[in-house]
Image (spheres, rainbow, N blue to C red):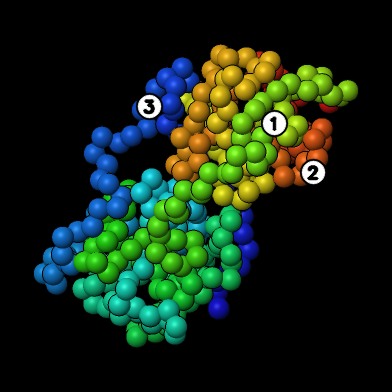
């Protein structure tokens, strides 16, 4: 089987909306964007399939394999699997996963171009073992995810569109595990008194770093050099966030010694809210095991502790 099992870390920029206007305008919304969760009223009739999809459409890219897969964050659907060009990937309820079998042939496959197997590589944060392939009736091999045959949608004309979501009540965007993409329910609030990491920021002094920001549990707070402050954006998603958890919003009254300029909150597309200082998103590091640890300092030449005024501390 020709599926590549390796993973590569693909940095996917996530531009986020701000609750405070001091860190950039909200110019990230496309005026003509269709709601991602919108479903078509009825399945496409055979006569509606056609063949003139346009060179820039998902159908125009159908001859190509999926390449390096990516996990995109969609406001309505949560984590959505996309190909290397950013086109949304779909599954069909009339197919089967155990065993894998495609029931989309002929005109159906014109509207829903088959994604061939052969060069797909799992996205960062995705289990490579969910990738597979199925032999179609014409002998060609089609990519599967979690056993489900994978398709693009001919009416997605640019990366990020999800026009195929819900079509006919049978077509759905793929989640990274092969299930139907669906936004996870918000996590319940932590019980009162269950730690202070989400409720306070303060300043600590380290012999190497000097004064630097820590959370309510004394864990060092970091910035990522690949993020931006104008417009405010986080480039840490997927596996990155698993290693560098976002600092949740902290009331200014509980931020002792921290500059208030640019003190704002990011509404991330993954549903989390993230504290920003001087308009820069801030994080902690899972490699720090106890208060005072600074194991994240200088990691990859991109992660650094934060001074009380929100600046990077690059000396250690």
Q: Is residue 103 left or right of residue 259?
A: left
Q: Is residue 82 visible?
A: no
The residue that label 1 is drawn on is 216
Q: Which of the image's four quarters has the N terminus?
A: bottom right
Distance (Cα) linking label 1 and label 2: 14 Å
* In this view, 229 is above or below 138: above
* Of marks 1 and 3, the one in the foreground: 1
Q: Residue at x 23, y 57 (%)?
A: 39
Question: For the image shown, how many numbered marks are present on the structure?
Answer: 3
* Residue occupied by mark 2: 289
Name the quadrant containing residue 224. Answer: top right
Q: Is residue 144 above or below residue 138?
A: above
Identify the residue at the far left of this view: 47
Q: Residues within 10 Å of mark 2 (few under 14, many from 20)?
A: few
Q: Position of residue 71 (x, y in %)?
A: 49, 53
For mark 3, what is the residue?
A: 26
For residue 62, side relative to residue 267 (left or right):
left
Mark 3, secondary structure of its residue:
loop
- Mark toward the start of the polypeptide (1 vs 3): 3
- The secondary element bearing badge 1 is classed as loop
Location of residue 63 by image quarter: bottom left
**Residue at mark 3 to residue at mark 2: CA–CA distance:** 37 Å
């Amino acid at each position: 089987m020709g599926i590549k099992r390796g993973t590569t870390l693909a940095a996917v920029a996530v531009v986020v909306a701000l609750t405070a206007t001091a860190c950039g305008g909200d110019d990230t919304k496309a005026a003509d964007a269709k709601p991602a969760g919108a479903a078509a009223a009825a399945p496409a009739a055979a006569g509606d399939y056609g063949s003139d999809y346009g060179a820039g459409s998902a159908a125009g890219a159908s001859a190509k394999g999926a390449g390096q897969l990516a996990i995109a964050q969609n406001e309505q659907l949560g984590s959505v699997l996309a190909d290397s060009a950013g086109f949304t990937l779909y599954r069909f309820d009339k197919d089967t996963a155990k065993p894998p079998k495609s029931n989309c042939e002929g005109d159906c496959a014109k509207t829903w171009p088959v994604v061939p197997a052969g060069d797909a590589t799992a996205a960062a944060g995705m289990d490579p073992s969910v990738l597979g392939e199925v032999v179609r009736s014409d002998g060609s091999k089609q990519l599967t995810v979690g056993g489900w045959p994978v398709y693009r949608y001919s009416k997605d004309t640019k990366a990020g569109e999800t026009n195929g979501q819900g079509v006919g009540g049978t077509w759905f965007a793929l989640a990274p595990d092969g299930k139907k993409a669906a936004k996870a329910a918000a996590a319940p609030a932590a019980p009162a008194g269950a730690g202070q990491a989400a409720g306070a920021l303060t300043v600590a002094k380290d012999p190497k770093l000097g004064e630097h920001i820590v959370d309510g549990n004394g864990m060092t707070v970091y910035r990522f050099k690949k993020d931006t402050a104008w417009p405010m954006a986080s480039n840490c998603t997927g596996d990155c966030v698993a290693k560098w958890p976002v600092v949740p919003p902290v009331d200014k009254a509980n931020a002792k010694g921290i500059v208030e300029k640019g003190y704002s909150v990011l509404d991330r597309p993954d549903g989390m809210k993230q504290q920003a200082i001087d308009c820069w998103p801030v994080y902690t590091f899972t490699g720090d095991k106890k208060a005072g640890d600074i194991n994240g300092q200088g990691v990859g030449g991109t992660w650094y502790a934060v001074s009380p005024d929100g600046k990077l501390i690059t000396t250690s």
